[in-house]
Image: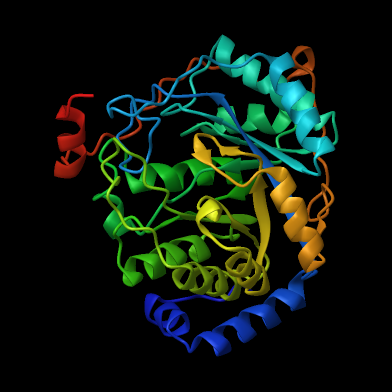
Amino acid sequence: MQQSWTKEAILELYHTPLMDLMYRAASVHRTHHDPNTVQISTLLSIKTGGCPEDCGYCPQAARYHTDLEGNELMSVSQVKAQALRAKASGSSRVCMGAAWRNVKDGPEFDNVLEMVRTINKLDMEVCCTLGMITENQAKRLAEAGLYAYNHNLDTSEDYYKDVISTRAFQDRLDTIENVRKTNVTVCSGGIIGMGESVEDRAGMLVALSSLSPQPESVPINALVPVEGTPLEDQPIIPIWDMIRMIATTRIVMPHTQVRLSAGRTQMSQEGQAMCFFAGANSIFAGDKLLTTPNPDIEQDKALFDLLGLVPQKPFVKHSQPLTVEAADSAWTALGEKPKWTRPGHEIERNKAKERKAP
């Protein structure tokens, strides 16, 4: 039976003396996972930049003046080549990200479905993060062979409105609910270091752990401040905050894969090792996370060798989905135009960055 966590209980856990917290987290981790096995995932930006949202942390938002070089949707053959390269480097999962507010039925989504079919046939787990999706779109992705869908909550519901004004927290929950109507697993986590309080971090973990079932994958990102975004001046979070967050997440969601995500370039090998000990058992590999710098694969291989870690094979946690070809599909485009919300409030620091000349 899934344990119910309150914010107060999570805060008490988070503030436990660090040695006790890590010991408890490591004990929970060893009960449910092989402590020497870590999943390697590759994040691929299949469509970069030009996003209409105003997420304060993101250089892909069209309204902010960053030096990001955008690109149109990649071709299926380009994606296949990148996936094969990732597989050769030890990755068992490819996560494809498109800088969209939400999925729209049409040729671009049809191409993404073909990318999913192609990668699943390479015997790799396929994950997508494409923004908000409807139930029918989720079913089309599932039919194509999608293994996981990523849609982060980002932070607590309270702090969310200080970071993003172009869509509501509930939209994110609704998207996750649509994914849950299929056999696709859920990947959902958040970012720390955006100026939120520890109470907000606990609030995010309450929201994630209250999902039933809990997400199969929970990425914990450390903010990487990007010049030109509203959060460009945020200080880098201490490694101790990351270790506490990883450990608390592991205890609160014992069965999930806790992913040590963005921000690893700012962490020492020792810091990353402590995160693995505290329950992180998944990383993103490759020199970029969509648009964020990341350690290269050779550095990660050296770290794995040093710590005696082995890459997780695909489909260990859940079986490989079947792929249905487009011609045999039972689910077709409905031409939906869903009314995802636009809350309408303004975030002054976001507006200030929109006004600032490049």
Compared to residue 135, the image places residue 164 above or below, namely below
Residue 230 in the image, given as x and y percentages of width and height = 26, 42
Residue 334 in the image, given as x and y percentages of width and height = 53, 17
Residue 270 in the image, given as x and y percentages of width and height = 62, 69
Q: Tell me if 354 is positioned left or right of 76 in this view.
A: left
Q: Which residue is found at the position 43% from the left and 51% from the top?
A: 153
Q: Which residue is found at the position 30% from the left and 67% from the top?
A: 197
Residue 332 seen in the figure: no
Q: Which residue is found at the position 44% from the left and 48% from the top?
A: 173
Looking at the picture, tell me which residue is in the foreground, 240 or 57. Answer: 240
Residue 169 in the image, given as x and y percentages of width and height = 35, 48
Task: Name the image quarter holding residue 241.
Answer: bottom left
**Quarter of the figure with the C terminus:** top left
Q: Tell me if 145 is positioned left or right of 159 in this view.
A: right
Looking at the picture, tell me which residue is in the foreground, 318 or 17. Answer: 17
Looking at the picture, tell me which residue is in the foreground, 1 or 132. Answer: 132
Q: Which residue is found at the position 62% from the left and 39% from the top?
A: 287
Looking at the picture, tell me which residue is in the foreground, 255 or 289. Answer: 289
